[in-house]
Image (spheres, helix red, strand yellow):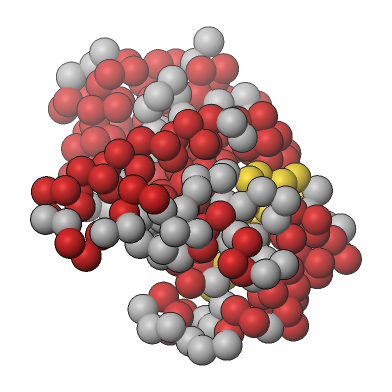
């Protein structure tokens, strides 16, 4: 496909004189264009929910989620993967972001990295991808060779495949079982897909990781009960969650949290069921990790 035909590469009629605009006009037109992103994402909700369910099912059998992409797309995948660790209390291996060119590509462009189909496959091979896993290939253009290589390798080993792009009839959609195409149109700055396309991708990744984690018991209502209290702010958040769910005062919440080795879930079940740590963990295990079922 000729790159000129991609909507993400087109010129936006609203910003043809961008270089003559004042700052207030630039931010106003950017805000106006950004309002279109949520609408574009909404059109893909059925595909996004299908993908989230696939990810949740993989997690239930010990599978992992891999995001793979180049440039902005790759960085957004790495970002979402990293944020899942403290938010949902998971091990880093459960959700991983792979970017063409490796870790240094997070801050410095690695020339030609995204053009290698083989590198996309090799990066997954080096992580021992299996048929239990899910691979989400991310490319605003929908044609990045690195992503194509990753999706094809994932298909070869029997892993679930999801393509996330910002163009209709994207090439990567043809290499995945589930295709999410969020068409946001030309960027304010032509071809700068870190803008609307990046925003759209971030929104979708938020949905995929959050919905799949909720589906495997990582929340109680809208509370992140698997949060890792690794700093003062998160300890306080943990205490707030415990007091909110159980109704006890903060002193008892802190005492129990310490007895639970700073597991918010364990602390909640210990208080709600008046049991010790081991009994609480057993109840959670029997409930599949869902706090609501464990404290019934």
Q: Which residue is depicted at the point 50% across and 59% down?
A: 10
From this view, report whether residue 126 is shown above or below residue 20.
below
Instruction: Please indicate whether residue 230 sits to the left or right of residue 70 in the image.
Output: left
Q: Is residue 4 visible?
A: yes
Instruction: Please indicate whether residue 29 sits to the left or right of residue 203 in the image.
Output: left
Residue 225: image location, x then y, percent? 40, 33
Viewer-closest of 98 and 268 = 98
From this view, report whether residue 115 is shown above or below residue 5.
below
Q: How many marks?
A: 0
Q: Residue furthest top?
A: 296
Residue 84: image location, x then y, percent? 45, 50
Q: Which residue is depicted at the point 44% across and 16% down?
A: 273
* Residue 95, quarter of the rendered image: bottom right
Q: Residue furthest bottom?
A: 111
Q: Which residue is depicted at the point 51% across and 67% down?
A: 74
Viewer-closest of 52 and 193 = 193
Viewer-closest of 219 and 41 = 41
Q: Is residue 139 visible?
A: no
Viewer-closest of 264 and 17 = 17
Residue 208: image location, x then y, percent? 56, 42
* Residue 2, quarter of the rendered image: bottom right
From this view, report whether residue 18 is shown above or below residue 203.
below
Which image quarter holds the N terminus?
bottom right
Residue 158: image location, x then y, percent? 86, 58
Q: Which residue is depicted at the point 34% across and 48% down?
A: 14
């Amino acid at each position: 496909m000729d790159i000129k035909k991609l909507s993400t590469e087109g010129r936006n009629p609203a910003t043809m004189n961008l270089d003559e605009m004042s700052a207030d006009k630039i931010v106003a037109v950017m805000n106006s264009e950004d309002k279109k992103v949520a609408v574009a994402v909404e059109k893909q909700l059925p595909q996004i929910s299908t993908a989230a369910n696939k990810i949740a099912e993989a997690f239930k059998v010990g599978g992992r989620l891999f995001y793979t992409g180049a440039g902005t797309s790759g960085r957004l995948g790495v970002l979402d993967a990293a944020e899942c660790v403290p938010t949902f209390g998971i091990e880093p291996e459960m959700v991983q972001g792979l970017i063409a060119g490796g870790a240094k590509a997070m801050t410095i462009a690695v020339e030609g990295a995204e053009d290698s189909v083989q590198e996309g496959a090799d990066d997954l091979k080096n992580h021992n991808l299996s048929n239990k896993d899910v691979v989400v290939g991310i490319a605003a253009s929908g044609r990045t060779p690195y992503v194509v290589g990753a999706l094809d390798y994932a298909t070869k080993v029997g892993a679930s495949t999801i393509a996330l792009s910002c163009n209709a009839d994207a090439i990567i959609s043809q290499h995945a079982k589930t295709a999410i195409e969020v068409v946001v149109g030309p960027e304010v700055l032509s071809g700068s897909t870190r803008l609307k396309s990046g925003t759209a991708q971030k929104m979708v990744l938020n949905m995929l990781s959050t919905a799949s984690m909720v589906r495997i018991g990582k929340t109680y209502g809208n509370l992140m009960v698997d949060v890792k209290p690794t700093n003062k702010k998160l300890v306080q958040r943990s205490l707030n969650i415990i007091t909110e769910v159980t109704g006890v005062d903060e002193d008892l919440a802190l005492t129990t949290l310490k007895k639970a080795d700073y597991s918010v879930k364990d602390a909640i079940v210990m208080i709600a069921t008046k049991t010790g740590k081991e009994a609480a963990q057993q109840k959670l295990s029997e409930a599949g990790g869902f706090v609501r079922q464990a404290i019934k």
